[in-house]
Amino acid sequence: MSHKKDIYSKTIPFALMVAVTILIGTIVTTIAPMFTKGMHPKLENLQPYTMLELAGRDIYQKEGCVNCHTQTVRPLKADVLRYGDYSKAGEFAYDRPFLWGSKRTGPDLARIGGKYPDEWHIQHMENPQAFFPKSNMPKYPWLKERAINVNEMKARMDALGFPYTEEDVAQAAESTELDAMVAYLQIIGTAVEKEGAMVIEEDSVEDENPLAGNAAALEEGKALYAAECAGCHGVNAEGNIGGSLVDYAAAEPASRDTYLVIANGYEGVMPGFASSFSKERIWALVEYIESLGK
Amino acid sequence: MNEYSYDYRTVQGFILSAIFWGVIGLVIGLLISVQMWDANFNFGEYFSFGRLRTIHTNVLAYGLGIGAEFGIFYYLTIRLTKRNLVLGKLARFHLWLFNVGMVLATFTLFIGMNQSLEYAEFEWPIDIAIVILWVIFTIVILTNIFKRKEEHMYVSLWYIIATLIAVAILYIVNNLHIPATLTKSYHLFAGTNSANVEWWYGHNAVGFLFTTPILAMFYYFLPKATGLPLYSHRLSIISFWSLIFAYLWTGAHHLVYTPLPDWIQTLGIVFTLFLIAPSWGSVINGYFTVDADWSKMRTNYLTKFFVLGITFYGLQTIQGPSQGIRVISSLIHYTDWVPGHVHMGTMGWVTMIICASVYVIIPHIYKTEIFSEKVANIHFWLVLVGQLMFSITMWVTGIQQGAMWKMTNADGSLKYTFMETLVGNYPYWQMRTVAGVIFVVGMLFFVYNVFMTIRKGMAKAALADAKAA
Ligand code: HEM
Ligand SMILES: [Fe+2]
């Protein structure tokens, strides 16, 4: 090919042309939107992180939690059923950086705040397998050994321009990294009003367990209990964070009431399982729990 | 200046450094692959998955990938400007700074200094070091290009220049942080904006660290290794400009169905689909180059590295745009399908072409032949099988996972608990570990071949010196 003096022979014009070519898409999709309102929404009741919460968020980053957990619920039926209301842009105004993630090796955490009591997180970080025997989440026993560095945290709060009081500082000073992590987890996603994806009405549930006396259901209930419930209620249902189900069953509660507790949970104490377990599975659990009282 | 006085020591230094960091990154990859199916393989704070996974991606991207790119770019620059590095001493310094920087950077990740922006995890002091490294690199290369002894810039130089400019812009903008202390900073951008900047950066890290530099190598070494002239200069012009134009528009395909404004998502998806065209421009150029004589596949051991490498690039650039479409994203986003995609690119395209380039460069430096074509063939087949097995197992389990997450019962509840969907991955994750072992063993054959070639070359040079004396 004849090499007439074209742009491919002139270094500076070539480099400039490359820079301009690269900058067009950059400006339209990334720089220009920064100056639009759509990129800076903020929910009215969204609060900056407290010192302890920020310390927890920093540990979340330090431990690389974002490698396995997302923090954004998509507006898709199954996502909403599994995790809760889909994520709103206005929830993230104080998030530097965003922690939406790109991989769900573990479940999404965008609605984890308030789902479980603090004690659940404390025990779960210590030993995830106690709650989910087949979980692949690492144990984090070192968190409870470490104190929060208050001077470091003051500098961080100042850098972000988040307000804090002497009480906040005092609270952080007597907290461990584990306390901070729990504080952070409990605040995630709470700027949006919580609503269960599915709430089961009392009169939609049968009086009696349709699977009563069904041996296969009893086995299924037992297996499901071990996989999903034993962490809180104890491997032998002796009680831990949640009460003893042996004692519970001994009082011979109505099957329908047991069903409703499993389906709807108790706000902030026990999550409801209506959207994650089929009717048959819940009845199988009821069958297993009732067998404990016998 | 004649061919015999070119100084390739810095080139070789970078190649050996890249191999060193590559082996570390790969071994850590094997460990985290086991941790995914058995949490008992997490050993305390420093060897727990969250830390190691970050180290795996960074050591391989920055140590192996960019390390090799530094060395091979210097080699290409020397060849294509027909002169030694004008700033040879600065390049030498660059090599040392790179290795010291990698040690420090890896250390900071071990102790948990992590900005949690994918592929931009390093904290701000390391970011500054990286910018300095990049500026030195740019100065050395541009100086040679300005003072080149060949009027025309070959295609590879275009891609090199685009890489230098784009990476500088991307890295600096996404790493704008508010420093709080020496070890901690916060993204200048918040929430949705932070996400948009990060994935503009993340996607183009793929574009300008794993695509354009590898194309620079491909356009030079394919004709060199096969002795066949490049099929079409015009096609390479069209692919070049359309590729570097379109890439920057598409980051939002990583944020499909997130709270990012819809118009940015849709715009990103449209350009993502368009991206097939320029990508395949290079694929077709490669195929038609070899089309002049397919018997090279048999007679020239290197040809198959390049042909398979560009084939995986071609598959990636069909798969990638498909993943961007909303309906497909809704199934595979957040699943193991994505690591399947990633590793076809990194193992099948990037590493394949880098290794093949090294197989050309090292014997050339010593004016000798490769130590063993047979070992190179074993290397080829092992990495090919390992990579295919990796991607295929991850595709299968990714689709299974995505489907299980979605399935519902007649009563409107979800069919599977999260644990059930997780446990469904375990057999595939175990197969993936096997695939990884096969790949790593293949890479060890490569390392052995490179070292033996250098030994052979040094022995030959010593003999020549002895004769001359
Ligand atoms: C036309 C070319 C390509 C397009 C349009 C494309 C598109 C995509 C999309 C849409 C995703 C996100 C998947 C998801 O999370 O749901 C993705 C992920 C990824 N791709 Fe590609 N891809 C292309 C080529 C490549 C190549 C050649 C490589 C590597 C050499 C590569 C490396 C990656 C990586 C590393 C990720 C994972 C990002 C993460 O951490 O989430 N891609 N790609
Ligand atoms: Fe991408």
Image (cartoon, helix red, strand yellow):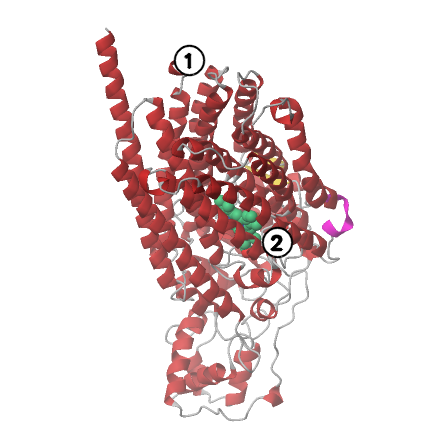
- x and y percent of residue B185 in the render? 59, 38
Quadrant position of the N terminus of chain B in the picture: top left
Residue A36 part of the magenta-drawn span? yes
The C terminus of chain B, quarter of image: top left
- Whichever of callouts 1 and 2 sits on the residue coming sooner in the sequence is 1
The location of residue A122, given as percent across then percent down, is 47, 59
Q: Is residue B76 above or below residue A72?
A: above
Report the disc number at residue B255: 2
Q: Residues within 10 Å of mark 1 (few under 14, many from 20)?
A: few
- Residue B367, percent from left and from top: 32, 22
In front of the other: A222 or B26: B26
Look at 42% across and 81% down and name the residue there.
A221
Q: Tell me where residue B204 sits by quadrant.
A: top right
- B171 or A179, which is in the foreground? B171
Query: Observer-nearest residue: B401 or B355?
Result: B355
Residue B295 is left or right of residue B333, and the answer is left
Discs 1 and 2 share one subunit: yes
In three-dimensional space, the C-alpha distance between marks 1 and 2, rounded to whole angstroms, equals 52 Å
Q: How many marks?
A: 2
Which disc number belongs to residue B2? 1
Do we see residue A40 in this rendering?
Answer: no
Left or right, B412 with reference to B89: right
Q: Was residue B81 drawn as part of the magenta stretch in this picture?
A: no
* Chain ID, mark 1: B
Q: From this viewpoint, is residue A215 visible? A: yes
Residue B203 percent location from the top left of the image: 57, 45
Residues in magenta? A34-39
| Badge 2 element | loop
The kind of residue on which mark 2 rests is Leu
Amino acid type at mark 1: Asn
> Which chain does tag 2 point to?
B
